Image (cartoon, helix red, strand yellow):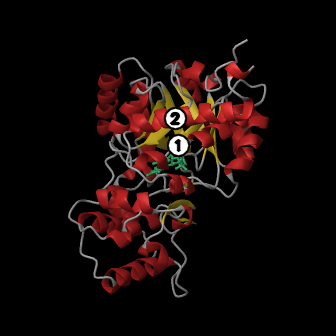
Amino acid sequence: MGRKNPLHTQLCDQLGIEYPIVAFTHCKDVAAAVINAGAFAVLGQTQSSPDEIDSNIRWMREKVGDKPFGVDLVFPASVPASGDIDTLRSQIPKEQFDYVEAMKEKHNIPKWRNTPVDWNLGWLNKEMPQKQLEVVLENRVPVLASGLGNPDFVLKRAHEQGVLVWGLVGKPRQAKAEIDAGVDGIIAQGYDAAGHTGKIGTFSIVPQVVEIARGTGVPVIAGGGITTGRHLAGALALGAAGVWTGTVWLASRESDVNMTLKEKLLKANATDTEHSNCVSGFTMRTLRSEWHKEWALPEAPKPAPAPYQILLFADIKASAFDHNLENFMTEAAGQGVDFVHTMLPARQIVMDMAEEAFEVFEEIYGDDDDE
Ligand SMILES: Cc1cc2nc3c(=O)[nH]c(=O)nc-3n(C[C@H](O)[C@H](O)[C@H](O)COP(=O)(O)O)c2cc1C
């Protein structure tokens, strides 16, 4: 008797997709390619204005037709309730501000040419994510993912609009709270991951959350360090219904990431990433740069809390990209960067990941024909 397709999971049924692979990306071209290859993509829209989100949603619909896609926003609890960029910049603590000004001089960092992307308010106050959220709900985007913060406050409205809500967690108690609140999917993300992440490793957090979700019908999506088919097979073996992936798409052919940074990523290995609060004020895994080294010096002050550390870095980060200062370039990157050494089309990445996962299952359980 033929064995069940090991890659066909509850997540495939929830979304009507072929492969249980979710791409998190800021790049619409990557998202469309992944979806059209039979997987799923969630577009990171934290740094987009409500109008931009509206037009990006339309663009996605043109490219993927009726296939579903998601939008990711963040709802950080510990940032100011409101405040425009000038107000927030005027509140940056002096000690850290002076340290960064001295750093600019020490490294001869010229002023940026393009307004820093991190001045967009999505991460910086509580007001903007609410405006972004309105656009996502009005457009009835199939999936809303909350990358930070419990999305319980939006569940009722989202469900009335037919929008599924996923929450991303790094701790079991957050998973319990979000599942109890009624999320439709829970992303269990480990320490290996790019971006904001806690201290529990992927191999520990995923089965813990699977246990919490057992019997609730809520699919668990594993995140953190997942870049190959072997990782995908491993995540399914841990009880996940799919994988949530970010780093693997960064250096893809379609990705709009700066080419110097892409090359830096392709050369990087796991130990070139750092889990630190120097980039955003929250602990975050990013590719090591001169910025990280400066904040690790004995004379460095403690990084400022979010959102002020984001603003402190915003100028230098913008200068790094405008003036091609490779040593100050960084991006969120997970430990799985170690497996990303070739620039491949996003479709190929989906296919390679699925094929390798099938092979792994065959390796373990044997081919159907062997029975
Ligand atoms: C370049 C980049 C930017 C990211 N930005 C966000 C973001 O804006 N919001 C968010 O919720 N997660 C963000 N993340 C984290 C991803 O959503 C995801 O949790 C993570 O990449 C998964 O781990 P992996 O990179 O090891 O696959 C980002 C990740 C990367 C690689």
Q: Residue at x 26, y 67 (%)?
A: 324
Residue 41 in picture, x, y percent from top left: 45, 33
Depicted 76 relative to depicted 85: above or below: above
Residue underneath mark 1: 245
SS for dot 1: strand
Q: Residue furthest left?
A: 113
Give the quarter of the figure containing the N terminus. Answer: top right
Q: Which mark is residue 159?
A: none
Q: Are marks 2 and 1 in contact (CB under 8 Å)?
A: yes
SS for callout 2: strand
Q: Name above or below for residue 314 compared with residue 249.
A: below
**Do we see residue 194 in this rendering?**
no
Q: Quadrant of residue 232?
A: top right
Task: Count the numbered circles shown.
Answer: 2
- Three-letter amino acid code at the position of disc 2: Val
Q: Is residue 99 visible?
A: yes
Q: Quadrant of the C terminus?
A: top right
Query: In x, y percent, where is residue 208?
Result: 77, 42
Side of 118 where 296 appears, left or right? right
Kindly identify which numbered label has been placed on residue 22.
Answer: 2
Which of 220/84 is in front?
Answer: 220
Asked if disc 1 is less than 8 Å from ligand 1, the answer is yes
Q: Residues within 10 Å of mark 1 (few under 14, many from 20)?
A: many
Question: Residue lying farthest top?
Answer: 1
Q: Position of residue 138 (x, y in %)?
A: 40, 25
- Residue at screen point 56% across, 36% down: 356
Q: Residue at x 51, y 66 (%)?
A: 272
The quarter of the picture where residue 21 lies is: top right
Q: Amino acid at mark 1?
A: Thr
Residue toward you, 84 or 309: 309
Q: Earlier along the polypeptide chain: callout 2 or callout 1?
A: 2
* Residue placed most toward the observer, 369 or 262: 369
